[in-house]
Image (tube, rainbow, N blue to C red):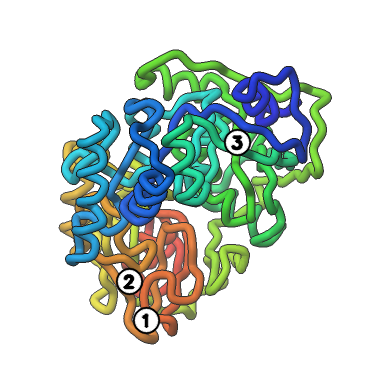
Amino acid sequence: MTITEKILASHSDRKEVFPGDLINARVDLVLANDITAPIAIREFEKIGAERVFDPDKVAFIPDHFAPQKDIKAAEQCKLLRDFSHSHNLSLYFEVGRMGIEHALLPEQGLVLPGDLVIGADSHTCTYGALGAFATGVGSTDVASAMATGECWFKVPESMKFIYYGSLKPWVGGKDLILHTIGDIGVDGALYKAMEFDGETIRNLPMHGRLTMCNMAIEAGGKSGIIVPDEITERYVKERAKREYKLYTSDSDAEYSEIREYDCSKIEPLVACPHLPSNVRPAKDLADITIDQVVIGSCTNGRLEDLREAAMVIKGKKVNPNVRMIVIPATQNIYKQAMNEGLIEIFIDAEAVVSTPTCGPCLGGHMGILAKGERAIATTNRNFVGRMGHPESEVYLSGPAVAAASAVLGRIGLPEEIGA
């Protein structure tokens, strides 16, 4: 069996499962945010459930429109808070303790290898980087899981992606996943577990792995997953709040497809409007001027991402025609960035630094685009109207290209500004 099949089998008390099987499986964690939890709460109450299956396994994180941007957002967030208090949820993260959910939960040691995690947010697939099966579901499935501790699944087929070769300067997890989505398309892995493997992955640090699994959904994937190794163990050992189990894929496991990529040929990439699969080398887009740069999100708001952006922009200024918004993904990341002097580098460059929030990524707040404006962002989606006006444009890149573009006032490379 593949790692995905083993995790699903163990959580449904079966010796084995096969792609296409319909199963009921126990969940280790259920999560929702200020957009999706209110729907789940209403459904939970509608079915007459009186208590959650385990108050230590339901996480509510107000991160999309929080800190609350308007009355409607405030009402949504209040619903989460009231429900969490009445059900004694230990994993309710109020503003000041919260962060962007998919950065916060791994950081806090709440998602671990071998876990089965569902979340009412499509980027729940991020946790596959830890060797967990994690996937986004609808709010009604979350409501049912909050009551029963179980969720139904159709066991997905697995696709294997093998990466080999050394990475060029400024190329990281974001470029690897953009290259992959560019190759297979936004529905190339529809309802499949995307298993990332190969020497390049084994040498990829955890933040790069989290970025790759985060964007599995952008290829239509049911999940992204990486077999845990020493890098995984090092990451979870100091954070884990409970026991965990390391699964691996058998050498004779079956995959619907196997693809290989020579990473030494991959350059810093940009996904152009209006699909994450519309990928081109950054060097070919020097004629694209920009109005806004966003460094952050559940895709690239981790400390290493901020370090990379700071390395590029240190001692330089944001172009006078551009606004640059930097959003550390959690309070801990914010604090570490402050201690390392990264926040000062950004402010000296005339960027603004925000409290943790999803904010502009979904066109929520803290960086909405006007008609005709263009942004380059380290976020995960660039659909029509994603960051604001339907006639605005979003380009996706890694932190280094985004930071260099902020200085140049157009899409460009760190080398162009001497980084």
The label nearer to you, 2 versus 3, is 3
Residue underneath mark 2: 292
Q: Quadrant of the N terminus?
A: top right
Kindly report the distance in space between the C-alpha atoms of the residues bearing marks 3 and 1: 35 Å
Callout 1 crowding tier (Cα within 10 Å): few <14, some 14–19, many ≥20: some
Could you tell me the amino acid type at mark 2? Gln
Q: Are marks 2 and 1 in contact (CB under 8 Å)?
A: yes
Could you tell me the amino acid type at mark 3? Ile
The residue positioned 38% from the left and 80% from the top of the image is: 389
Kindly report the distance in space between the C-alpha atoms of the residues bearing marks 2 and 1: 8 Å
Q: Left of 15 or right of it: where is 94?
A: left
Helix, strand or loop at label 3? It is strand
The image quadrant of residue 133 is top right
The residue positioned 62% from the left and 40% from the top of the image is: 166
Callout 2 crowding tier (Cα within 10 Å): few <14, some 14–19, many ≥20: many
The residue positioned 64% from the left and 57% from the top of the image is: 181
* Label 2 vs 3, first from the N-terminus: 3
Q: Residue furthest front?
A: 48
Residue underneath mark 1: 373
Could you tell me the amino acid type at mark 1? Glu
Q: Left of 398 or right of it: where is 159?
A: right
Query: Residue 62 location, x and y as percent?
Result: 28, 49
The residue positioned 80% from the left and 28% from the top of the image is: 253
Residue underneath mark 3: 225
- Whether residue 388 is visible: yes
